[in-house]
Every structure is written in structure tokens, then in C-alpha cells.
Image (spheres, rainbow, N blue to C red):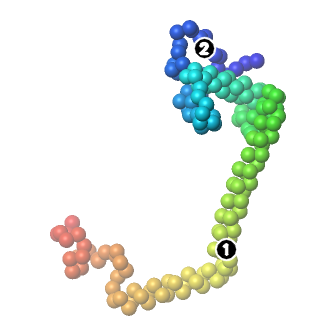
Amino acid sequence: RCFLMEPEPRDSESGAGASSSDGLPRAAVAKLVKERLPPHLRTKPDVAALLSEMAGEFLQMLTSEANEAASAEKKKTLSEAHLLGALRKLGYPQLAAECEAVGEAEHGAQAAAKARKRKLKGAASTLSTEELLAEQQRLFAGARERLQAGGGEPPGAAAPKGAPDGGRSSGGPPA
């Protein structure tokens, strides 16, 4: 079996506080363990290091199996199906089923969100093209009337160069 990373040889001097290059971060693993254990139970310091290495090894086996499946299909990208198949091949069919259920729930939530977005977008454009054009013309006419009633230019419009603007421009001499 080919692993993505070969485990480094252990030396007898490495302690529980040492960092592992092929495992998960020990602090994160220690936090997960602490959250999952009942409050009256404690663990030895080397438990987090061991779990970190075990999790790293498990992920290496899983990705190796998934990579073999993808390579057999001449695919360059691992998919959810490759990972679920690898879990089953490694002897974790129940975990694969649980992961599949979580994935389906996630996909269902994403599909529902997309459907809501499409529904909202569709509701905004229930008018025909002719009705939308008429509404646009009505809005333009109203804006024109307000502009003419105000007796001037639209806000933000600059006065022609050299025309008196009552000091509204930059306040300095013309450039």
C-alpha cells in the first residue's frame, strides 16, 4: 500500500509536546478529546499526541484508497464518491453511510437555498418586457419633471467651464 507521506522514524527522546509532521495539530486534538470526555475523566498528556498520529495515519490511508479509486477511473480530482468508497473498502461502511447522510443533508440545504434565491429572483421580474419598459419610461418622466421643477441641473452635475457656479465647484481658481 502506498501512502502519501511515509511516517518519520520515532526517536526515544521525542516527548508528548513535540509537534507531529504527519498528524493533526495536537492542541486541536486535545481540545476535541476534552470536549468529548465527561468532566470527571482526564487523559495523560501523550494521549493527544497518539490520537494525532492515529488520525493522520487514518487520513493517509483514506486518501490513498480514494486516490487509487480516482486513478482507476482516470480522474485527477478526488470526489465525495471516491472518499465514501474508500471508507467502505477500509471497513467503515457505517461511517461511510453517516458521512453520506450528512453530505445529502448538506446538498439538500444548498439546493433549498438556491431554489429560494431563484424564487426571489423570479418574483422580482413577473412583469412582461413591455410592462418593464413602460415603468422605466414613467420613472424617467418623473425624474425629468422633478429636475425641471427644481430649476437647475441634477445633483452632482458640473457647471459648464467658465460659467458662474456660485462657488459650488472646487472653491479655487479654475484649472
Say whether residue 52 is left or right of residue 150: right
Please tell me whether residue 71 is drawn above or below residue 123 in the rendered image: above
Residue 1 visible from this viewpoint: yes
Q: Position of residue 151 (x, y in %)?
A: 34, 89
Task: Specify the quadrant of the image occupied by residue 3.
Answer: top right
Which residue ends up furthest to the left in the rendered image? 173
Say whether residue 96 is left or right of residue 120: right
- The answer to which of 13 and 77 lies nearer the viewer is 13
Please tell me whether residue 98 is drawn above or below residue 55 in the rendered image: below
* Amino acid on which disc 1 is placed: Ala
Say whether residue 45 is left or right of residue 116: left
Q: Which mark is residue 123?
A: 1
Q: Which mark is residue 162?
A: none
Label 2 packing within 10 angstroms: few (<14), some (14-19), many (20+) = few
Q: Position of residue 15 (x, y in %)?
A: 53, 15
Per the image, label 2 sits on a secondary structure element best described as loop
The residue where tag 2 is placed is 8
Per the image, label 1 sits on a secondary structure element best described as helix
Name the residue rendered at 50%, 83% in the picture.
140
